[in-house]
Amino acid sequence: MRRKVTKAIFPVAGLGTRFLPATKSVPKEIMTLVDRPLVQYAIDEARAAGIKEFIFVTSRGKSALEDYFDNAPQLEQELRRKGKDELLEILKSTNMDSGEIAYMRQHKPLGLGHAVWCARRFIANEPFAVILPDDVIAAEKPCLQQMVEAFEETQSNMVAAMDVPDNATQSYGI
């Protein structure tokens, strides 16, 4: 039986030390690149690759991340009242349907592997992607889409990696 990747884990519990001092009060995943938070790029890439379930492994101080994906009825009503339909559509594209997204806590910063382990009950024995929203990779065909297509063909595990200078590895959890 050919299995598909439809779940993704977003390990977002880190302290954000690469982006200090900004991350002292704002989760790094909410920081913007041009006009959207980093996490929105990751969600858009995941949706384009066929991901249907989004599992966020969070920690204390990440409530803004959860709020970002929630409905904002008062803001939607105001935009509708002012006839700002284009902004309303942009806002709606950030909403996640109930049951499409789940959050769990990583209580201690024990690394990426531990964050993935924290999501194990949501994954069971299904194939899944792990997405790091603070690394945006620009490509003609998105990286995750390439990986999902390769998985569908091979049914094998794979990892996308990038070069990091030796003197910067401690900032990447290596």
Image (cartoon, rainbow, N blue to C red):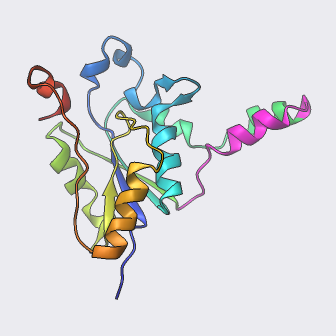
Question: Residues in magenta?
Answer: 81-99
Q: Which residue lies furthest to the bottom in this view?
A: 1
The answer to whether residue 55 is seen in the rendering is no
Identify the image quadrant of residue 20.
top left
Viewer-closest of 143 and 68: 143
Kindly tell me whether residue 155 is visible in this rendering: yes
In front here: 50 or 109? 50
* Count of labels in the image: 0
The image quadrant of residue 155 is: bottom left
- Horizontal relation, residue 65 to residue 8: left or right: right
Left or right position of 97 against 80: left
Q: In which quarter of the image is the N terminus?
A: bottom left
Q: Where is 109 relative to 145, above or below?
A: above
Picture coordinates of residue 60, whole percent (x, y): 32, 33
* Residue 7 included in the magenta stretch of the image: no
Quadrant where the C terminus sits is top left
Residue at left offset 33%, top offset 39%: 12
Figure check: 41 above or below 100: above
Give the camera-side residue of 66 and 153: 153
Check residue 90 for magenta coloring.
yes
Residue name at image x 48 percent, y 49 percent: 45
Whole-percent x, y for residue 95 in the image: 62, 46
- The quadrant holding residue 93 is top right
Whole-percent x, y for residue 116 in the image: 23, 53
Q: Is 73 on the left-hand or right-hand side of 57? A: right
Q: In this view, does 55 lie to the left or right of 172?
A: right
Please provide percent x and percent y for residue 58: 34, 41
Furthest residue to the front?
A: 140
